[in-house]
Amino acid sequence: MSEYLPDLTFVTPAGRGNRGPGPAGRVIIVLLWLVVCALPVVLAVPDLRLAAGRTGTPGTLTVVSCTALGQGRYDCKGRFTPDGGGPAVAVAASPDSDAGDVLRARLTPEGDRAVPAGTKGVLAALTLPAVGVGGLGFLPYVIGYWRGAGRRTRHGLAVAGALVTGAGLAMVIVGMVAAYA
């Protein structure tokens, strides 16, 4: 590395055991970490409410067409028929659909798209919050490290962090399998 940067001197700051940023920096990092991990949970609430039947109109979605947009992305269109009767509505369908799919779905209150309902819809909607949960796994370890927790405590926090992150990853996998099954 030094042959590429001959005029720079790399120095490790001394003092305080080199435990990372100062108190203000630590607070900022923790707050940003919390925001980044909580945001997927907050953003998933409308889809979770829809898939769980708390909002929207129940009915049947028939996927009419799926157009490849390139790079593995698709734009799917469908026809939603409400259970209570009435005319079918043209809607955007989930991009993980296939043309010809017929499934139970719920129409958004805006009436522009329909999402799978029931267990499949709920599991698929839980994928995004699972990313946030998995991301929170090692935050307690980092806080414990900065606060000078003992080795055994940090080890326990690391194991707990691995379990929480693993659970988040498992939830993501289950949600993705449900979405594409």
Image: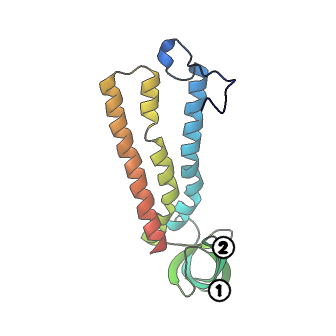
Q: Residue 95, position in %: x, y?
A: 59, 73
Kind of residue sitting beneath label 1: Ala
The residue at 65%/86% (across/down) is: 88
Find residue 119 and report its image quarter.
bottom left
Residue at the far front in the pictured view? 3
Instruction: Please name whichever residue, 95 or 122, is drawn nearer the observer in this view of the structure.
Output: 95
Which residue is labeled 2 in the image?
70
Which residue is labeled 1 in the image?
88
Instruction: Please name whichever residue, 181 or 4, is drawn nearer the observer in this view of the structure.
Output: 4
Q: Secondary structure at mark 1?
A: loop
Q: How many numbered discs?
A: 2
Tag 2–tag 1 contact (CB < 8 Å) = no
Q: Is residue 118 visible?
A: yes
Residue at the far left in the pictured view? 152
Instruction: Please name whichever residue, 105 or 5, is drawn nearer the observer in this view of the structure.
Output: 5
**How would you rate the neighbour count of disc 1 (Cα within 10 Å): few for under 14, some for 14-19, many for 20 or more?**
some
Left or right of residue 39: residue 178: left
Find residue 50 and report its image quarter.
bottom right
Q: Secondary structure at mark 2?
A: strand
Find residue 5 and report its image quarter.
top right
Separation of disc 2 and disc 1 at Cα? 29 Å
Residue at the far top in the pictured view? 15
